Image (cartoon, helix red, strand yellow):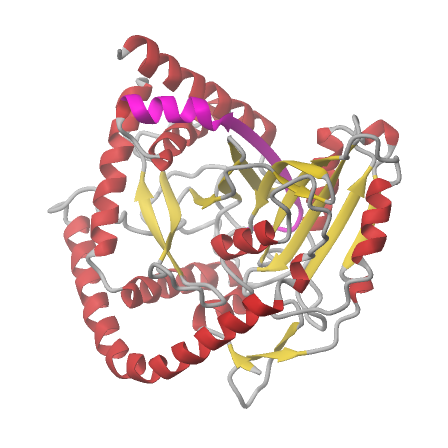
Amino acid sequence: MSKLSLLDFGFFVAETEASPKHVGGLLICKRPARSSPGYAKSLYQEYLGFTDVKAPFNKCIHLSLTAYPRWKTVTVDVSKHIFFHTLDKNKNDRQGLYELVSELHTPMLDRSRPLWEMHVIDGLADGRFAMYYKMHHAYADGVTMSSWMTDSFSASADDLELLPIWTLSRTRRERKRAQLNQELLAAIWKDVVGGSRRFFGVGRLATMLFLESIKLTKNAIALPFVSSAKTPLTGQVTAGRQFATAAVSMERVNKIRTRTRSTLNHVALTCLDGALRSYLNDLGIELNRPITIQMPVNLRKSGENSLGNKIGIIQVELSAPTDDPYVRLRNIGYSLRNVRTMVDSVAPEAIESYTLITNLVAQIAETLRLSNHMPPMGNTLVSNVPGPKDHLYIKGACLEEMHPISTLPPSNLLNITLFSYAGELYFGMIATDELPHLDQLAHYIGVAFSELEDTVLHNKG
């Protein structure tokens, strides 16, 4: 058995029926030309034959009153993890698909078994089918999961080999295991020096946040729990989920990036800032201060491939209220550059400690059902996971769309994940079913992008 990191264990501590801690992905595929209508059902049946399950998909959580929680290797019955669905003919459009995925994403995974599922969904119009993956966040962070997903598909329609995600190349796993053994040896030294790095890093970070609180600095990491505005985006997380998406072509995004010398994050967050303000205005809420988001940051060093999660979550202020999309873009770019500089100046151990402390406070509030009465850490959580640049295939079927589906942090009723794939930037939005008109927020993302595009490319030239 292998020991869980504190962050991985935190996902189990925070998990409830109302707030499960799994993440997922919705993949929409086009059947190969001249394939039979039973293609998706045949694919499902073939998946059931892959019973040689590799880590971490053969791991259960082992909780004990006398020992630290660990992963335990078990024998896997894949028929309890792989499922088949057919959409009704009168509900086989995108909305019907999203409703089914929302239902599948709502319940917790069964802790008596390895914490993953895969659902093949047939019956979509125009010869399409979908696959919905669901796995516990303690298995890995979003970047790692995206890498696993990519490895389970082919780069060519002519490659008909099926390589399920739970049976990834044994050679690759052995290389990673060897690397983990090296990391274990290095951990002895890290335990010696890591404590001091963490201590001094936390002290440095605390000083920066103090200076921010007394307004001697601006646009470093935003302070948590200071958003006093009451909006439908925050409060006590409840059971029931809804899912919506938006998409923008990367060609359009890159034109704006080139003209303004901005990053993809700058452009995407500018669109989200404008969309969220329009959405809140529809609900009669006009914020007079910047929207604050929680934003995961990758703390892995280049080339590091360890399993589990190695991320921090920090608070970032977006733009002050403005009707000018270009001004909004510049404000957000300024804020993100300063945040990146600040994060790079602090030891990763300090960011990890900061994440654990702030999330612990928020989790205690949610456990005591106080999230409706105290300020949230931020207005929503936004993450960005890069995906493959070219189309992938599964036994000749083209993977046309990849949509991320995340989990909800304490006090946040909405989580937005960006995912770039095959020339498209996808916005995957998961929310409690109490959040009104989520599809309208998806619409406003497209509107905000068009406004930014028009301002930058036509009026700022």
In the picture, measured across the screen, residue 220 lies left or right of residue 375, that is left
Closest to the observer, 336 or 150: 150
Q: Residue furthest front?
A: 158
Closest to the observer, 356 or 47: 47
Q: Residue furthest bottom?
A: 66
In the picture, measured across the screen, residue 242 lies left or right of residue 120, that is left
In terms of image quadrants, where is residue 148?
bottom right
Picture residue at 50% right of the left edge, 25% below the top: 249
Q: Does the magenta segment cover residue 233?
A: no
Position of residue 446 measured from the top left corner of the image (x, y, whole percent): 50, 22
Residue 299 in the image: above or below residue 27 = below
- The stretch in magenta equals 237-259
Q: Residue furthest top?
A: 459
Closest to the observer, 167 or 328: 167
Residue 287 in the image: above or below residue 153 = above
Picture residue at 34% right of the left edge, 43% below the top: 227
Residue 323 in the image: above or below residue 375 = above
Quadrant (top left/top right/bottom left/bottom right) for the C terminus: top left
Q: Is residue 110 visible?
A: yes
Q: Is residue 321 visible?
A: no
Closest to the observer, 163 or 414: 163
In the picture, measured across the screen, residue 259 lies left or right of residue 119, that is left
Picture residue at 76% right of the left edge, 61% below the top: 81
In terms of image quadrants, where is residue 74?
bottom right
Q: Does the magenta segment cover residue 251?
A: yes
Position of residue 374 measured from the top left corner of the image (x, y, whole percent): 41, 51
